[in-house]
Image (cartoon, helix red, strand yellow):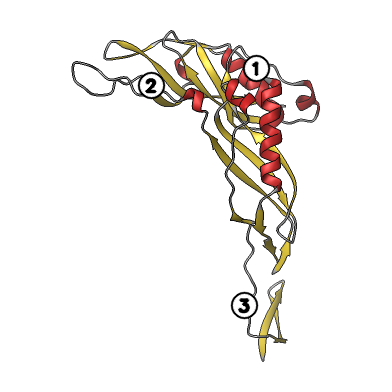
């Protein structure tokens, strides 16, 4: 059937006839995962005490097939260690998993289109799972970890990150947030990026690991603290 469409340019409107089929044009949408898959952490990553949230970026074509994938965020691992091989093994396994996924393609202007989608994995390292400590006097679990938000202001020493030369040359900047675990003595035990440009994450994480906090007491007992420190890189 036909309908009248008013086209307006500079406050002047012209009525034109337009033919429509009666079918609605699909709304623009991002790729949608059809079916997930179980991900197993490589043994080398388990042995290196790697865990935390990991984000993978996937380029999905107009047919819903992954074309490229890369780890863009995370993971976390102990400060003082540089398990490059284990991190590489983890990224390889994540990319292989991502390339085997199926998607409903993105829709743009009513047609299937290629687009990038981000998926987040929450790694569960079995070596880091520990049973709760029970207070024999009360029979209740003893708090061993306090969770906070952004804790920059609570640092005794907050080291500044070095600006990676390649990132600086390409004017890559912005905020990078690092999730840290502070020990009972105030030293940083482990850290991992939770936001920010991939090229800046290692430098921010290294600075976070070299920082120090005042010990936190709960009912007079020192406890671990989980929080976030944020660094801002200005090109």
Check the image and report above or below for 123 versus 159. below
Residue at 69 percent across and 16 percent down: it is: 162
Q: Mark 2 or mark 3: which comes first in sequence?
A: 3
Cβ–Cβ below 8 Å for labels 2 and 3? Answer: no
Which residue is the site of mark 3?
A: 24
Q: Secondary structure at mark 2?
A: strand
Residue toward you, 81 or 5: 81
- Cα separation, mark 1 vs mark 3, equals 52 Å
Tell us which disc is closer to us: 1 or 3: 3
Which residue is the site of mark 2?
A: 145
Which residue is the site of mark 1?
A: 161
- Cα separation, mark 2 vs mark 3, equals 53 Å
Q: Secondary structure at mark 3?
A: loop
Residue at 58 percent across and 11 percent down: it is: 210
Q: Mark 1 or mark 2: which comes first in sequence?
A: 2
Tell us which disc is closer to us: 2 or 3: 2
Q: Position of residue 198 (x, y in %)?
A: 69, 31
């Amino acid at each position: 059937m036909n309908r009248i469409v008013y086209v307006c340019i500079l406050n002047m409107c012209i009525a034109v006839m337009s033919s429509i089929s009666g079918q609605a044009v699909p709304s623009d949408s991002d790729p949608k995962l059809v079916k997930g898959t179980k991900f197993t952490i490589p043994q080398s990553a388990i042995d290196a005490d790697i865990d935390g949230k990991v984000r993978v970026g996937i380029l999905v074509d107009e047919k819903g097939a992954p074309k490229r994938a890369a780890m863009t965020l995370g993971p976390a691992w102990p400060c003082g260690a540089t398990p490059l091989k284990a991190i590489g093994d983890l990224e390889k396994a994540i990319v292989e998993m991502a390339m085997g996924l199926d998607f409903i393609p993105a829709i743009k202007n009513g047609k299937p289109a290629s687009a990038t989608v981000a998926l987040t994995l929450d790694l569960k390292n079995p070596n880091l799972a520990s049973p709760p400590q029970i207070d024999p006097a009360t029979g209740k679990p003893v708090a061993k970890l306090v969770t906070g938000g952004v804790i920059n202001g609570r640092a005794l020493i907050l080291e500044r990150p070095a600006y990676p030369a390649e990132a600086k040359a390409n004017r890559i900047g912005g905020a990078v947030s690092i999730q840290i675990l502070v020990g009972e003595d105030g030293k940083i035990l482990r850290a991992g990026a939770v936001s920010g440009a991939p090229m800046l994450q290692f430098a921010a994480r290294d600075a976070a690991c070299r920082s120090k906090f005042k010990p936190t007491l709960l009912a007079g007992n020192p406890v671990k603290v989980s929080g976030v420190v944020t660094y801002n890189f200005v090109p």
